[in-house]
Each structure stands twice: as structure tokens, then as C-alpha cells.
Amino acid sequence: MLHLKIKELREKLRISQQELGEKAGFNQQEISNIERGIRKRFTTDELQSLAAALGVSVGRLLESKAG
């Protein structure tokens, strides 16, 4: 699931939700909502921003298996 993948990748980078938000153009509360699965819809641009901030491709971000 996307929210778990985002959290896992962020934790692997050892960055805070605040830091990820700053890199991806979200605030900390938005990142929290994303990681908890509250926010489920994203624009293509938002997915690209999250992927870039996490150092992965959008394809990798959308992979169903974490890791």
C-alpha cells in the first residue's frame, strides 16, 4: 500500500515527516495523513514530487511490495 511504502522509504532515509514535506512540497500534517492512509488520492505531480524527495521512481513508489 502506498502509504506504508512512503513511510518505509522515509524511515530508511532517516528523515522526518517535516523534512519529507519540505522536499516534496507538503506540510508535515499532510505527510502524516498520507502515511496513515487518510489521504489516498494524488495528482501525477504530487506522486512525482514524493518519489523525487524519496529518491525513487514513481514506479518504485507504486510497487505493491515494500522493500
Image (cartoon, grey):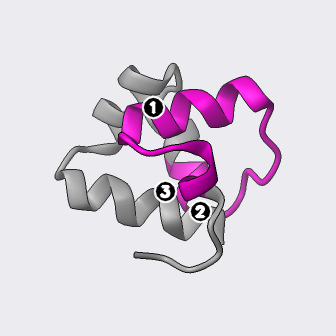
Circle 1 residue = 52
The stretch drawn in magenta includes residue 39: yes
Please identify, in this view, whether the residue under mark 1 or under mark 3 is nearer the observer. Answer: 1
Q: Are marks 2 and 3 in contact (CB under 8 Å)?
A: yes
Of helix, strand and loop, which one carries label 2? helix
Q: Which mark is residue 6?
A: 3
Instruction: Please name the amino acid that badge 1 sits on.
Output: Ala
What residue would you read off at disc 2? Answer: 3
- Left or right: 37 as drawn, with respect to 21: right
Q: Where does the N terminus fall, quadrant-wise?
A: bottom right
* Residue 50 as seen in the image, left or right of residue 16: right
Q: Quadrant of residue 67?
A: bottom left
Q: Quadrant of residue 60?
A: bottom right
Marks 2/1 in contact by CB < 8 Å: the verdict is no
Q: Earlier in the sequence, mark 1 or mark 3?
A: 3
Which range is magenta?
A: 32-61
In-front residue for pair 36/24: 24
- Name the one closer to the observer, 59 or 11: 59
Q: CA distance from mark 1 to mark 3?
A: 12 Å
